[in-house]
Amino acid sequence: MHRIKVIFFDAAGTLFHVKGSVADVYLSYAESYGVRRTPELLDAVNGAFRRAFHDAPPPIFAVTEPAEIKRCERLWWFDIVHNVFYRVGMFEGFDDYFDKVFQAFDGPNHWVLYQEALGVLKTLKEQGFELGIISNFDTRLFNVLRSLGLADLLDTVTISSLAKAAKPAPQIFRVALGKHAVDPDEALHVGDSMRDDFQGASQAGLSAVLVDRSGSDVPSHSPSVKSLEDIPRFIASL
């Protein structure tokens, strides 16, 4: 019998994803500020977002009050989005634009569940596993999970701005484990990032599996699945 008692999931990119792309959303709101959407600009915004997000510091803040945490999260994202349009072309009214696009991701409008996600979580819950989220998302995640119908299936949600640590750091995994009172070898983490999810969880002592929907070249020593539907079988094989 395997020892797995808790299954943690990454959030965005693993259980749900942006409708279209981040650039689609950013430009749909920017059009009312005079920004003309073109295929070239769409590609440029997508590339600029990837660079800006990669270069951003971890979303960890030296504050504890909920209102201050949310303020810091907003400023963190302001810097990223400002960086994107600084690279591709700034426009008048950016502050007002950012307010709208930041709020746009606080709910279901621009997120969509992977087709199998809800069914897999229900199956795992029925099998007796505790379920949790470990994510570098911000506090808007709680609204997103509720609006997508996932919240009631989850026992815990651990995010970087509240845990004072971000994946792949071991501390965020330790915080999540503590909520369930389990040892690392009693938990599995499922995610789509080799660095943040697979390597981070493995280094913290958890079992880990990478969700590789694109069929990229995953090292042979790194367990991977093509879909969340494969997770129950993967657990049974441990």
Image (cartoon, helix red, strand yellow):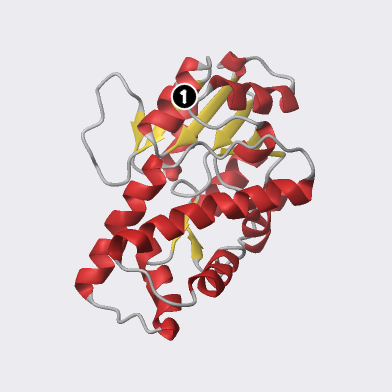
Q: Quadrant of the N terminus?
A: top right
10 Å crowding of disc 1: few (<14), some (14-19), many (20+)? many
Question: Which residue is drawn at the image coordinates 56% and 40% (left, top)?
Answer: 59
Describe residue 105's horizontal placement relative to residue 50 as left or right.
right
Residue farthest front in this picture: 92
Question: Which residue is drawn at the image coordinates 51% and 31% (left, top)?
Answer: 167
Describe residue 221's horizontal placement relative to residue 129 as left or right.
left
Q: Which residue is mark 1?
A: 200
Of residues 117 and 19, which is closer to you in this image?
A: 19
Describe residue 8's horizontal placement relative to residue 177 as left or right.
left
x and y percent of residue 199 in the render?
41, 23
Question: Which residue is drawn at the image coordinates 65% and 14% (left, top)?
Answer: 183
**Residue 128 shows up from this direction:** no
x and y percent of residue 109 in the render?
55, 71
> How many labels sit on residues?
1
- Using the image, determine if residue 25 lies above or below residue 32: above
